[in-house]
Amino acid sequence: MNPLRLLAGKPRAQTRGTARENLSFTLDNGQTVDVLRVRDPRARRIKLSVSERGARLTLPLRVSEVAGQRFVLEHGDWLMAQLASSGGSTPALQAHATVSIPLRGGELPLLWKEGRALRLAMAEDALHVTVPAQLRPLLLRRALRDFYEAEARADIGRWLPRYLPDLPRAPSRLRLRMMSSQWGSLAPDATLCLDLALVLAAPAAFEYVLVHELCHLIHADHSRRFWREVEARFPLWREQRDYFRGEGRRIKASLHALCGNAKD
């Protein structure tokens, strides 16, 4: 026997990785809810939780799918109450059924029609959506996400030239992504990252976050000097901060409900 194997001890069994699957459950009251089911090798019990990303069911590896489904149904009333309080009650995007989507603090009507290719186009204060008869939901969510990103970049393009002249430098790159808790960040290389959900918020709130992150090009911290820079450029920043405290979780949850399963 190799003595090195004795010193190393018994080989550790290989651990299975975490498996994720998006499911829809029909509750006893007839409501349908989307739940992310996660099989986690570290889990010791069934757990149902709600965040701005929606509902999540965590299962240990040895718990059956039937037991997980039963757990969701038994806690259906609690689940819907938590989704409502967290702002996570926005229904998933559904072709020909979703009548409007949030945009810039309001609701944008959707007008659906069938066609050969998927296409989203703004016209007369409504979003016209052409969808093929057979369309994977993921492709529709990605198309909506691309629409939101284009709208967000258009807003930033209108605001940014106003603030660049008195900054020491411009951001090196702009990224828009779905963020869990933050609304924006500025990397050491001056890459500016903003939450895509900002385009769902009131425009003044979106602009405030942009100004906030641009001021980090001057001061990287949140010192008094930093806040003086914010105040000089955006005097009503406190109102927008309060807006996010009241509406932020709902806004993030709405974006995740509509296109959160599309990849970053």
Image (tube, rainbow, N blue to C red):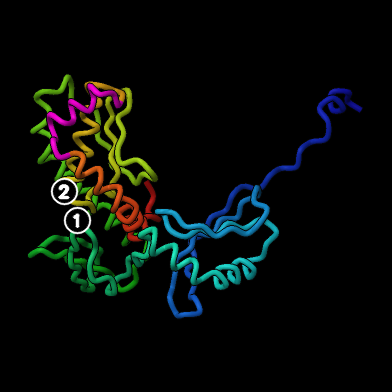
Residue at x 34%, y 71% (from the top left corner): 134
Contact, CB < 8 Å: mark 2 with mark 1? yes
Q: Report which residue position mark 2 lands on.
A: 203
Span shown in magenta: 222-236
Question: Is 166 placed above or below 90 here?
Answer: above
**Image check: 256 left or right of 216?**
right
Q: Is residue 248 magenta?
A: no
Residue at x 17%, y 64% (from the top left corner): 127
Rendering quarter of residue 181: top left
Q: Report which residue position mark 1 lands on.
A: 105
Q: Is residue 225 magenta?
A: yes
Give the overall secondary structure of the magenta segment: helix
Quarter occupied by the N terminus: top right
The residue nearer to you, when weighing 176 against 230, is: 230
Where's residue 242, x and y in %?
Answer: 25, 46
- Kindly tell me whether residue 171 is visible in this rendering: no
What amino acid is found at the position of numbered circle 1 in the picture?
Gly
Where's residue 49, x and y in %?
Answer: 51, 57
**Image check: 167 left or right of 14?**
left
Rendering quarter of residue 214: top left
The residue nearer to you, when weighing 67 against 145, is: 67
Where's residue 228, x and y in %?
Answer: 18, 26
Residue at x 29%, y 74% (from the top left corner): 97
Q: Secondary structure at mark 1?
A: loop
Q: Residue furthest right?
A: 1
Question: Is 150 placed above or below 121 here?
Answer: above
Rendering quarter of residue 173: top left
